[in-house]
Amino acid sequence: MGTIERTPFGAGGIAGFAEALRRRRLTAERATEACFKRIAALDPVVGAFEHVDAAGALAAARAVDRLLDAGFDPGPLAGVPVALKDVFAVHGTPVHAGSNVPVEDLIGSEGSFVARLRLAGCVIVGKTKTNEFALGTWAGLNVRRGTPWNPWDARVHRAPGGSSSGSAVAVAAGMCGFAIGTDTAGSVRAPAAFSGVFGLKPTVGFWPIDGMFVHSPTLDSIGLLTASAADAALVFAVLTGTPVPAPAPARGLRLGRPTNHFFDGIAPEVAACTDKAIGMLRAAGADVVPVLVPGAEEAARNYRQFTLAELIARVGRDRLLAARDVIDPMHRDLMEREPPMSAETFAWLAARRHALSRSAEESLCGLDAWITPTIGVLAPPVSTLTGADGAAAVETAVTANCQQRIVVNVLGLCATTTPVQHLGANLPVGLQIVCGPGADARALGIARLIEDLVGPPPTPDLAPFLAAA
């Protein structure tokens, strides 16, 4: 069995990396090479990457080193290797949106968010796997282009979470400094929770979505997957030009624990970790009170009909029909069962979404956030989710366990997920903080408080993956 190249982010996270880079204890080129060595060692088994751009990344890293040597500092993210979900256009790399159906014409050229990463000095190492068209399921399956292997179990291929599956796995396996995903109904938070990393789903519209495959123009948002809340706060600050959100003070914090929907049907391990984290917040001085979330059930029911209509309109029924033999059968059946939606129905659903969003904002009045599980189950084996019986299992699990995330998107809110499995589970568990629209920095501050209270989560044992490679 070989050894795994040490990650350049192990001590102090991204902030520690930035300090070491400026003290020239390492270079951006060496850090990027270290990530590529980890990718070469681990990715043949975990399969997080759709495309790796070694030449482009090393050229960008050397450019950062030259700038630093010349006395010009691009900022705290300079030289940080970053992986992007395979829905973003990046110069010189292919983009598939997780599909064998050509969609490049729907994406266009490199967009403004990728430009922000480049301006900050980030080094783009490659594209990560996603569900086809970034469309559910929560499990992160892709039968056409491959399902990443959750790095928390080398013996059993467990669901990595979707649709930003590869981005979460890449971060969990230390193959990049942070990764970018997108979130329509939990597509950042589900893989973050299943893979034991931190996830931020910002308010819709927080970052522009040009230059990427858009599943739902109404609900899509670009999100962050990082090793910690502290890393996410730093990335958020640099990419927004705002101060780094500090940990929120526990005393005076008022959190709502929903009495409906969010805690339905959750696994005992998820309940135990969630309850212990809430107990630690209370002990630190936070006030956690019951709250009813109006319209949560309706929001969850209406989600799929609404977003499928937007996806079908985006891709086009003719294109989907022409390519039906190469589309993921589960997604193909889902889209083909969906009848064309009338303008009146779509307008009614949009109006209901706005009304439910207003009610949600009212229920947040007097509260800093809601606190909930991110997803109600532990990562299941992929084998239980494939085939006819597996498809039924996926549908059942979606109904029972996706409400924790879907409702956030439909109601127009922002959210984070923090790993808390070390409080009582042997597989990753996520704790979700939900804030009102525009309160993204507040959500990060509360997540940083939770991280300080519960401590850093463990990292997966990756050595068995070397033996399997």
Image (cartoon, grey):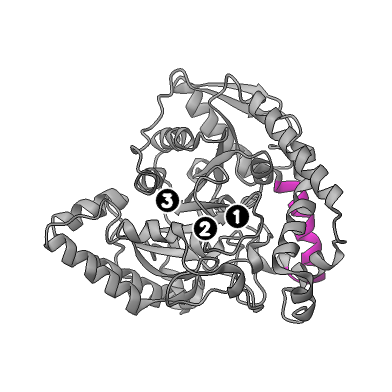
Identity, as a three-letter code, of the amino acid under mark 1: Ser
Judging by the rendered image, the residue that carries numbered circle 3 is: 458
| 1 or 3: mark nearer the eye | 1
The secondary structure that most of the magenta stretch takes on is helix
At a point 61% along the width and 77% down the height, the residue shown is: 145
Measured along the vertical axis of the image, is residue 322 above or below residue 418?
below
Judging by the rendered image, the residue that carries numbered circle 1 is: 187
Contact, mark 2 vs mark 3 (Cβ under 8 Å)? no
Q: Nearer the viewer, residue 107 or 441?
A: 107
Q: Which residues are magenta?
A: 386-402
In the rendered structure, find residue 297 and report the number of the disc placed on it: none
Q: CA distance from mark 1 to mark 2?
A: 7 Å
Q: Residues within 10 Å of mark 1 (few under 14, many from 20)?
A: many
Q: Reply yes or no: does residue 389 show up in magenta.
A: yes
Residue 385: x and y in percent read 72, 65
Judging by the rendered image, the residue that carries numbered circle 2 is: 181
Contact, mark 1 vs mark 3 (Cβ under 8 Å)? no
Identity, as a three-letter code, of the amino acid under mark 2: Gly
Q: Earlier in the sequence, mark 1 or mark 3?
A: 1
Contact, mark 1 vs mark 2 (Cβ under 8 Å)? yes
